[in-house]
Image: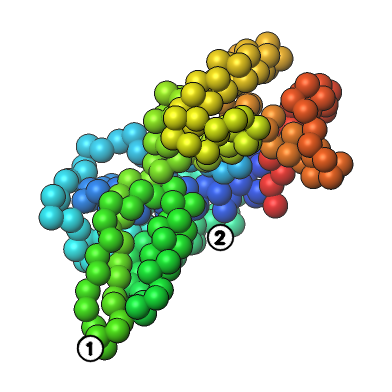
Amino acid sequence: SFSYRELLQGPGFGRRRNQMLDAFAALLAEVHLLGLYWGDCSLSNVLYQYDADAVAATLVDTETAEVHEEGLSHGQREWDLEVMVTNVAGGMADIAARAGTEIDEADLDLGEDIADRYRGLWAELHREDSIGPNERYRITERIRALNELGFEVDDVILDATGDSDVLRFKLRVGSRRYHRNRLQELTGLWTSEKQARTILGDLQYFLTHQEDGDSATGKAVGAVRWRVGVFEPWLDRIREVSPGHVDPLQAYCDFLHHRFVLSRSAELDIGNNAAFDDWVAQGRPGYDLE
């Protein structure tokens, strides 16, 4: 993990900027969903780590936080955002001062950018839709879309409208751990959210080549076989070629991505051995950043 100062002052911040801001906005949305008023929301109260093709943010300082079991009001959430915008601007000004640059060159609007991303995500999480009598599939579509964002869906709320054939629905959204929970249930592995999504893809790829891989029993047995026969051996090989400070789970995701890139380029499946040799020869590349 690393602090925001390490990321902002590093050479790759320009390409990581959107990832960091999205991660921070998603973390803030998650804690608000849980009824947590942060109170001192700032970049310095968060640790970051590379998470497959993204950056993940973890709250590390809750000294000023307050839990509201009834949930947060709109005003409480907006005040948390105001505090965040002010704190982030102060942090950016401090970085500029330490670097000896003019205050006008500091990214003082960084907090406003985070707030905009937060509001967009919050609106998506709480959107209400109307469905006709033969459109209940749209509920499944909506759940899958939120799962792709990493959020669990705890409940589906249906309300009648003035039209007897139309129902209004919204989803009660839970924690942002959908893929990591699925991976843990199947394999016992604990990873970050985007890493879990990537590794689940590898597990699904393995299961498609197993007999009875679609049934519940077949998935359970296949998951054990995958962990023992695929994941653990390859993780050991990755550890052997990686520096000690490298997160082996992130390196495993980098390797899977490299295998995918090679396969897409060749328009055929590239096996693990060939992909691994090429990945090592290329210097163990990670994800390309836009």
The residue singled out by tag 1 in the image is 162
Q: Nearer the viewer, residue 71 or 205?
A: 205
Residue 75, image x, y percentages: 21, 66
Image height of 96 relative to 203, above or below: below
Which element carries disc 2, helix, strand or loop? helix
Residue 103, image x, y percentages: 53, 56
In the displayed structure, does residue 26 sit left or right of residue 234?
left
Image height of 127 relative to 203, above or below: below
Query: Is residue 143 something one can see in this rendering?
Result: yes
Query: Is residue 97 something one can see in this rendering?
Result: no
Amino acid residing under circle 1: Gly
Amino acid residing under circle 2: Asp
Q: Nearer the viewer, residue 29 or 129?
A: 129
- Point out which mark residue 69 bears: none
Q: Residue placed at 58% from the left, 36% from the top?
A: 204
Q: Of the two numbered discs 2 and 1 on the same chain, state the one appearing first in sequence.
A: 2
Q: Which residue is at the far right?
A: 266
- What is the spatial separation of the Cα atoms under label 2 and label 1, in whole angstroms? 54 Å
Q: Residue placed at 55% from the left, 15% from the top?
A: 228
The residue singled out by tag 2 in the image is 104
Which element carries disc 1, helix, strand or loop? loop
Q: Which residue is at the far front?
A: 212
Q: Residue placed at 26% from the left, 56% from the top?
A: 155
